Image: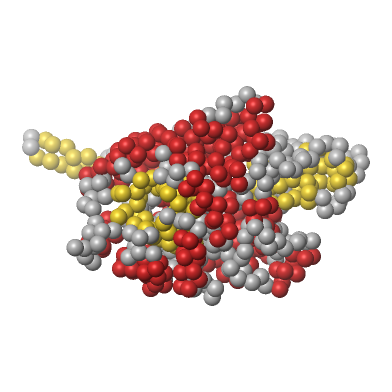
Amino acid sequence: MSREIKFSLLYRDMWQSSGKYVPKVEQLEKVAPAIIDMGCFDRVETNGGGFEQINLLFGENPNVANRRWTQPFNDAGIQTHMLERALNGIRMSPVPADVRKLMYKVKKLQGTDIARSFCGLNDPRNLENSIKFAKEGGMISQAALSLTISKVHTVEYYTKLANTLIEMGADEICVKDMAGIGRPAFIGKIIKNIKTKHPETIVQYHGHAGPGFSMASILEAARAGVDYVDVAMEPLSWGTGHADVLAVHGMLKDAGFKVKDINMKAYMEVRSMTQDFMNDFLGYWISSKNRQMNSLLIGSGLPGGMMGSLMADLDTNLKSVNKWLEKRNKPVLTQDDLLIKLFEEVEYIWPMLGYPPLVTPFSQYVKNLALMNVTQLIKGRERWSMIADNIWDMIIGKSGKLPGELAPEIIHLAETHGKQFYTGVPQDLYPDDLDHYRKEMKDNNWDFGQDDEELFELAMHPEQYRAYKSGKAKQDFEEELARKKEAKMKKDCKEVPAAVAGAYEPKSMIIDINGEKFNVGISYGDVAPAASTNGAAAPAAPAAAPAPAATGAVSEVVAPLEGKFMLTKDNTETALKVGDAVKEGDLICYIESMKTYNAIVSESAGTVTAILKANGDNVDEDDVLVQLG
C-alpha cells in the first residue's frame, strides 16, 4: 500500500510571505469553512509569527481573533499550528521565561494545537524551554531546523541538531527551509537520516518557492519519508510564497504517494475569497514582484517571509536614498538597483557575521545591517557606521551561539564600541517580568482577559498593545490605508490619457434609410475648450516665514533614517525628558525601523530644551528629534 503524505495549509504565512498584513478576523472566519470543505488539509497554520502584532496594528484584539479563527478547525478535527521564535517568542526581541511559559498555556486554550518552535541561530539552549513549556501547556512540540546553505551548515550538522532536539523531548521535527535555498538532495538526506534513527517521529517540510527549488525539494522530502508538507494556494502561491497545493498534489499522486482528494469547488471559493481580501485592502501592501520567482535569492539566501515585507518597505528606503541623491544632483536609483546592491551586501557581510541562518529575526538583522551599509556607502560614509542594539546582541552572543566564527574586523569593531562578548545561556539575561505588567494592568484598570491572555499580550507586545488600547494603532493604520488608496488613485489617473475636448462625440454613425445602411461622417467644426474654474491654476502659496533666529547656542539631534520615534525600547530604560543633562555619546532615543531599534546618540553635550516628537510618531530622515541648549 502506498504511503500517505498529508498537507498543511499556510494561511498565515501565505499572507506574510507576500506582503505586510494578514486578513482581519471577519475575513478569516468567512474563509475557514471553505478551507475545511476542500477536504485535503489535515493541518492549518493559523497564527504565530507576526500575526498578533498585525491584529494590534489593525486595532483588533488578537486573543479574540485567534479564538474565533481556530474554532472552526478545532470543530472539524483539523490540527492548528503556530510559529514561535524560541527566545524571542512571537516578537523580534528576547522574551522573559515567565512570559514565554504563559504563551503556550494561552495559545493552547485559544485553540492552537502545535507549537512550531525555531531558533534563528539553531541554538538548542534556546529551544530547550520551548519544548518544555509547550508540552507543559498541553501543546504538541514541533522543533524546527532553520535550514540554510553554508560551509558550516552540513547534512551532519542538521542531523545532529535534530537528534539533540528529539532527545530534549520534541514530539516532531520541522525541516524549515525558510528561504527555499535548500538543495533537494541535501534536504532528502537530512530527512532520511532523521527518519532512519527516529522512525516514529513526525517530520514536516516547510519550503518557500522563490528561488525555484521547491517542487524538487518536496519530491525529495517525500521519497525520504516526510509525513507532512506545507503548501499554499492561489492567488498567494509561488513567488516569495510557497508551492501551490494543486501542483504538489498532482506531483505526489503521480509519484505513487497517497494524497487526499481536493474539492475543487471549495478550492475556487477559497481562491476567490482570498483575491477579494486582496482587493479590499491587503493588496496595497503586496508588491507585484512578490508574485514572481527570483533565482537571485539563491545567492542572498533571504527568506520568503521577510521578502514579503521587504518589498513593501523598500519603496520607503528608496525614497530616502533618492531624496539624498537629488539634493546633491546625483543620479537616482531604481528599486532594482537598490535591491541588487542589497543582495550583494548581504552576501558580503553574512560570512563575516558568523553565518546566522537567515530566518526571523536574524534575516532582518543581516538585511537591515546590509541596507544601512548600502545607504551609508551611497552617502559617502563608512560601512558599519550604524548598528542597531538588536544586531549587536546577535554579534556578541546575547541571542545565542553563532554557527560560524566572526570575522576579525567585526570582533575589533565590537571591542572599539566597548561591547562584551557573552557565552552563557541567553535566557539568563532576561529575568521574569510578568509582575511588572500585572501592575500596569491593575494601574490602568485593564481586564486581564480569559486565561490571563490580555496580560500575556501586554507582556509580549507592550508598545503595540498600549497603542491598541489607546486607539492610536487603529488610527495610524487607517491613515496609512488612506494614503495608500490616495496614491493608487493618483497613479491610476496618470495612466488614463487626458480627455480631449470633443473626444466623446461620435465621428461617424450608421443611418438606416428604408433598409439601406449608410455610414455618415460627422463634423462639429472647431471646438474651443470650455473655460473651467476646476482647471485653473491654484494661486501660489505664500512663502513660509523665516524661522526666528536662535537666541543661544542650540544643537539638534536629527533622525538618521525613517521610522518610529521611541524614547525607550523596554521598561528597563528611563525616558529622556526636558531638563536632562546629556554628554556626547549618550543615548537619546531610538528609531524603530525595519523591526529593529536603532539607538540615536548625542553628538554633543548639553541640556535637553525640547523633545519635538511624541513616542510612536513617524519620522523622516533629517527630522529634528531633540534640541539641546
User: How far across and how far down the image is residue 157, in percent?
Assistant: 50, 71
Q: Return the residue found at the far left.
A: 515
Q: Is residue 178 above or below residue 66?
A: below
Can you see residue 400? yes
Q: Quadrant of the N terminus?
A: bottom left
Name the side, left or right, on which 237 lies relative to 434: left
Q: Is residue 446 above or below residue 98?
A: above
Question: Which residue lies at the image location 78% right of the left edge and 36% below the top edge?
Answer: 545
User: How far across and how far down the image is residue 301, in percent?
Assistant: 50, 66
User: How far across and how far down the image is residue 21, in percent?
Assistant: 48, 44
Name the side, left or right, on which 273 lies relative to 255: right
User: How far across and how far down the image is residue 12, in percent?
Assistant: 42, 47
Q: Nearer the viewer, residue 594 or 250?
A: 250
Question: Which residue lies at the image location 62% right of the left edge and 50% below the top edge?
Answer: 94
Q: Nearer the viewer, residue 393 or 56?
A: 393
Question: Which residue lies at the image location 40% right of the left edge and 37% below the top edge?
Answer: 69
Q: Nearer the viewer, residue 504 or 286?
A: 286
